[in-house]
Amino acid sequence: MAAAIRRAQLSTENLQACQSEILHLQLSLKEMDMRYHVEKQRRRELHNTLVELKGNIRVHCRIRPLLPLDCELDDPILQNGSDSREVAHAVDEETILVRCDRPGHPLINKTYNFERVYGPAEPQTAVFADVCPLLTSLLDGYNVCIMAYGQTGSGKSYTMLGPELPSDAHSDLGLIPRAVEEFFRLISENPSGSPKVDVSILEIYNNDIFDLLAKDSSTVVSGVKRDVVTTQDGCTEVPLLTRGAITSVLEFMELFHQGLRLRAKNPTLVHADSSRSHLIVTVTLTTATSLASTDQQPGQTLPGKRTRASERWSSAHQASPPGSVPVDPVGSRKQVWSRLQLVDLAGSECAGMSGVTGLALRETSFINRSLAALADVLGALSEHRGHIPYRNSKLTHLLQDSIGGDAKLLVILCVSPGQKHVAETLQSLGFGTRARQVKRGQARKKSPHSQIREWCLGSA
């Protein structure tokens, strides 16, 4: 009996020791997990700093959830259950894996790395959380461009605009309304610069530019046609483009919905409400700043620019619209312009899969050609070619300052997880990989002196 009691005591002591060891290991694991996440966040911040110093284009990738349109019952690959239909997976927050499984070919797993990868379950708030720092840069004087790229039906418009049907849930808002909401919140925290905000909305449809805010009684179902020009100073401008002054998110949303109503759309087999144009929303911030706060002193002019700059400023002062002149007549305070471009690109499309004919087929041709021109420009930039073919398309011509200039550029790749769209998914991921290879030099703030010519041209 005593031996049995002794054995029971020893078993109890061993059990308690094991429980204590398990608790110790759990605490150690929790601590290591916390340290891992802290170091991972620190690594990401350092990587983003390195990307910014190199002037690289940031590329994020978002995998949309699997939808009914991804199913093809006549495809033998898709008859083995949902797992076999889903071929694109987020391995971690920086890696996406695509399983290339074709009949008669060996299975190949391809991986791609980007600054951030979002899985199908990650909400709009997670995507926007990584965009917020760019809006702070906008108020610091940098130009910013956020662009959604991907095949038709991959979730670009949902990411940028939000759901097609009105939703009361704030969590469903797209990046464009969220960005403007955050933009005005940041402005309200520091109104000392007398900020003024205006917005323009245009679309590029069949390689033509249409002003979606222009008031023209003869225009009922589309915007007013405009053109893009390159000035003598190398800047791209759209003459006569309508710019609406806004003072709140509500005013922006009114103009935004007004412009969206005129955007070209057509149903296809892939998407019942397919966007047939590239949408570009430009928000311009004008703030007053003291020249003494810049690295150039009041009254000082750039070498070789004295006469020309003074002439430009004089002509701008005479022809300027209300609110666009120096705050201080003696010139101690000048206005600084920074620009936020939000771009919802039309989706690349396979005519055989989308089933388009007639006018829609012509639209598909123009969409694919403009996206190919965008890929050509990125390829030329990554290879440091002497000639960059910006003028091969109105899209690349208009976005020249953002793609190859000194703006902070974020490309959000939107991809489908389904086997049905694997070819288009790989094409989009290849596009993103090329974009990451572009080194443009570090983004620069917009100083008052460097922006005198930009304002003169933009207000003409």
Image (spheres, helix red, strand yellow):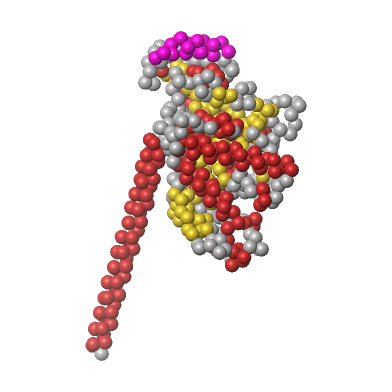
Q: Looking at the image, which is closer to me, 98 or 141?
A: 98
Residue 454: where, in percent of width, then height? 51, 21
Residue 231 in view of the camera: yes
* Residue at (35% x, 53% y) in the render: 36
Q: Quadrant of the C terminus?
A: top right
Residue 422 is a magenta residue: no
Q: Could you tell me which quadrant the N terminus lies in?
A: bottom left
| 194 versus 275 height, above or below | above
Tell me, yes or no, whether the highlighted magenta stretch contains residue 305.
yes
Compared with 423, 74 (above or below) is below
Query: x%, y% of residue 186?
Result: 48, 33
Above or below, 197 relative to 409: above
Residue occupying the point 54% across, 11% down: 315
Q: What segment carries the magenta color?
A: 303-319
Residue drawn at (27%, 72%) of the image: 17
Q: Is residue 182 visible?
A: no
Q: Main secondary structure of the magenta part?
A: helix
> Which one is nearer the viewer's eye here, 36 or 271?
271
Q: Is 382 rendered above or below residue 32?
A: above
Q: Is residue 264 left or right of residue 158?
A: right
